[in-house]
Amino acid sequence: MSLGRFLSVALASAALALSCLGLPAASSTDGGAPGPAVASGAGCKPCATASACCDAVGGGPECVFSAATCASLTGNARDTYIDGCQTFVKSVAVAWKQKPPSECF
């Protein structure tokens, strides 16, 4: 599978996970900017990393990760959203043969 196809599948999987939560995808212009809950250490840093990583690998408008969206969620919804962010970053590491761009750390 080509890298482009792999990333398309990873992005589609993340979008599906978000839609299962009933959440709109974040716009690619918010850059995953941390919201107030992130600043207080609510655990949404993986989503800021996923947003930067997605942009770095050329995900374009399909980049749906957002620390601000993560911070707005509670309970299981937040946990599921964070899992999606972490899964994307891990998928990029595999696709890039464990040498992804520095934004993916």
Image: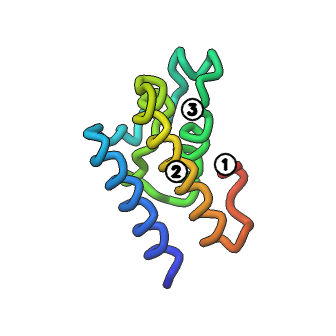
Decide: is 62 above or below 98. above
Which numbered dot is residue 103?
A: 1
**Residue 7 location (% of width, % of height):** 48, 67
Q: Which residue lies at the image location 71% right of the left edge and 49% below the top edge? A: 105
Q: Quadrant of residue 27?
A: top left
Task: Name the one closer to the observer, 73 or 65.
Answer: 73
Residue projecting furthest to the bottom: 1
Question: What residue does disc 2 label?
Answer: 55
Earlier in the chain: of badge 3 and badge 1, it is 3
What is the CA distance from the residue labelled 3 to the residue labelled 2? Answer: 17 Å
Left or right, 11 with respect to 37, comes to: left
Type of the residue with mark 3: Cys
Mark 2–mark 1 contact, CB under 8 Å?
A: yes
- In this rendering, the answer to whether 38 lies above or below 19 is above
Percent of width and height locating residue 92:
59, 63
Q: Position of residue 32 (x, y in %)?
A: 50, 34
Residue at (42% x, 59% y) in the render = 11
CB atoms of marks 3 and 1 within 8 Å: no
Q: Earlier in the sequence, mark 3 or mark 2?
A: 3
Identified at 40% across, 42% down, the residue is 28
- Nearest to the observer: residue 100 or residue 58: 100
| Label 1: few (<14), some (14–19) or many (≥20) C-alpha neighbours in 10 Å | some
Residue at figure coordinates x 65%, y 21% from the top left: 41
Amino acid type assigned to the residue bearing label 1 in the image: Glu
Dot 2 amino acid type: Asp
Q: Is residue 68 left or right of residue 27?
A: right
For the residue labelled by badge 1, is the local secondary structure a helix, a strand or a loop? helix
Please give the residue where the numbered disc 3 appears in the rendered image.
44
Q: Position of residue 35 (x, y in %)?
A: 51, 20
